[in-house]
Image: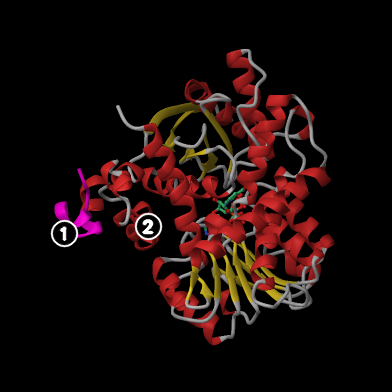
Amino acid sequence: MSFSLSERHESLQDFLNERAPNEPEFHQAVHEVIDDIKPIIDQSDAYKDANIFERLVEPERLITFQVAWQNDAGQIEVNRGYRVQFNGAIGPYKGGLRFHPTVNPSVLKFLGFEQTFKNALTGLPMGGAKGGSDFDPTGRSEAEIMRFCVAFMQELHRHIGPDIDVPAGDINVGAREIGYLFGAYRRITGQFEGVLTGKDEAYAGSAMRTEATGYGVVYFLSHMLQAHDDGIDGKRIMISGAGNVATYAAEKAVALGAKVISLSDSSGFIHDPDGLTDEKIAWVRTHKAKPGASLAPYVDQFGGTWTEGKTPWSLEADIAAPCATQNELNEDDAKMLIDNGIAAIIEGANMPATAKAKQVFAQSDVLFAPGKAANAGGVAVSGLEISQNRQRRASGADEVDQALQSIMADIHAVCVSEGKRDGRVDYAKGANIAGFRKVADAMVAQGVG
Ligand code: NDP
């Protein structure tokens, strides 16, 4: 049997409308890879015979469950929990948990699909997954967050395990939430095992997991610049977001001599023309840990300007690093960045640039690093955490950092080798093809039935 999309559907959009109606984020994620992988599928009878494309865009499992929990007023609230186990061909499922009101099947399928490629790029044996809840932690007390995490794990524990599925954090799920989730799992199952990553080092977490995504973004950026006879030292970088990825990317960029001139959150952005310092970044972390805190008071502390309700893309800089959330950089932003002379875009968040923004970048000379390659450092160190847990040992920070640097160098190299095009590197294409081949080969080898 051979498979061609055009035989059965007029277009990819037609196919997606039928198979995954009303899932715009998921459609966007599939459209992002299809042009790159379709020629690879078309050239391979093995991929066509195994119907790899249709199997790749259908999650192996989508679990939805009720999370009923008690708020501080004694009322029972109900949220929806999810786990999307997208593709397990190359290893146990792995991917973060997100608590945010925008969480729905479309968002989680886009994230799980991307995660499948990303995990393959790390070279570690991890399948792709994602999960979370539409729970909004904004303004919730510490006790409410703990009760929510416990109620969430009451159901999730049935679907995860060290050889089955190992979740981690994502938006609004940091070290505190991972602690509550792990404690709940341990009490429910009676097992102390490597079932979550991003744990504190006091209970079998890995050194450097907290820093890994942001640091990895900057390691990737350094390689990308070096490969184009340039370097990070002295570059002006604008970063969006003020959470885990953004603040650790800022920290590493500053350490390597860059000037980071912005951060943002869901209420606006700060512009600090003098550049962030370790002291300023530490203040941001402490301040943003308070429930519902906006970045706005930064300017009272350190100067600069605060712009309400906007993203930082109107600023002038050499590099833009969107590190907040999906679709936070649109076509107009992309044009503005190019007009203002941007040299490189590096996606710290997952799919932060819209499809149209990416088209604008692709038609220009700017370097563009896709999230599935650039932000893979977090899941890579999660993979190392799984290995440490299995061996019941703890690696030191230097050892993990070395391993992270080496993995980011390898990811950059494979993107270059698969993405070379007319003397330039199409990093998005390189990441898509390299990730695809690994997963597709494993799927073919394992057959069906
Ligand atoms: P955090 O929760 O630590 O921080 C998220 C930041 O983004 C906050 O500053 C938040 O602002 C802002 N933000 C969230 N939603 C929106 C929105 N709709 N509009 C504007 N700003 C928003 O998350 P992370 O730093 O962990 O994750 C950031 C991105 O990186 C996500 O796309 C995530 O999937 C991706 N990622 C994370 C990894 C990790 O290891 N943590 C690994 C790989 C990718 P506010 O505080 O106001 O809510």
Identify the image quadrant of residue 148.
top right
Q: Looking at the rendered structure, which numbered label has been put on residue 96? A: none
Q: Which residues are magenta?
A: 1-14
| Image: 401 above or below 419 | above
Tell me the residue that label 1 is attached to: 10
User: Which residue is nearer to you in this view: 437 or 5?
Assistant: 437
- Amino acid type of the residue that numbered disc 1 sits on in the rendered structure: Glu
| Lateral position of residue 273 relative to residue 121, left or right | right
Quarter holding the N terminus?
top left
- Mark 2 against mark 1, which lies toward the viewer? 2
Task: Let me know if residue 7 is in the magenta part.
Answer: yes
Residue corresponding to mark 2: 37
In the depicted view, which residue is nearer to us: 408 or 172? 408
- Please tell me which residue lies in front, 374 or 424: 424
Q: Secondary structure at mark 1?
A: loop
> Could you say which quadrant of the image residue 306 lies in?
bottom right
Q: Is residue 164 magenta?
A: no
Q: Upstream in the sequence, badge 2 or badge 1?
A: 1
Residue displayed at 55% across by 25% down: 163
Mark 2, ligand 1, within 8 Å: the answer is no
Secondary-structure class at tag 2? helix
Label 2, label 1: how many angstroms apart (C-alpha)? 18 Å
Position of residue 335 measured from the top left corner of the image (x, y, whole percent): 47, 81
**Which of the pair 427/327 is nearer the observer?**
427
Residue drawn 55% across the image and 61% down it? 415
Q: Left or right? Give the position of 86 relative to 47.
A: right
Up-down: is 121 above or below 78?
Answer: below
User: How is the structure coloured here?
Assistant: secondary structure
Find residue 319 and report its horizontal and vertical position in percent.
64, 74
Disc 1 within 8 angstroms of ligand 1 (CB): no
Question: Which residue type carries mark 2?
Answer: Ile
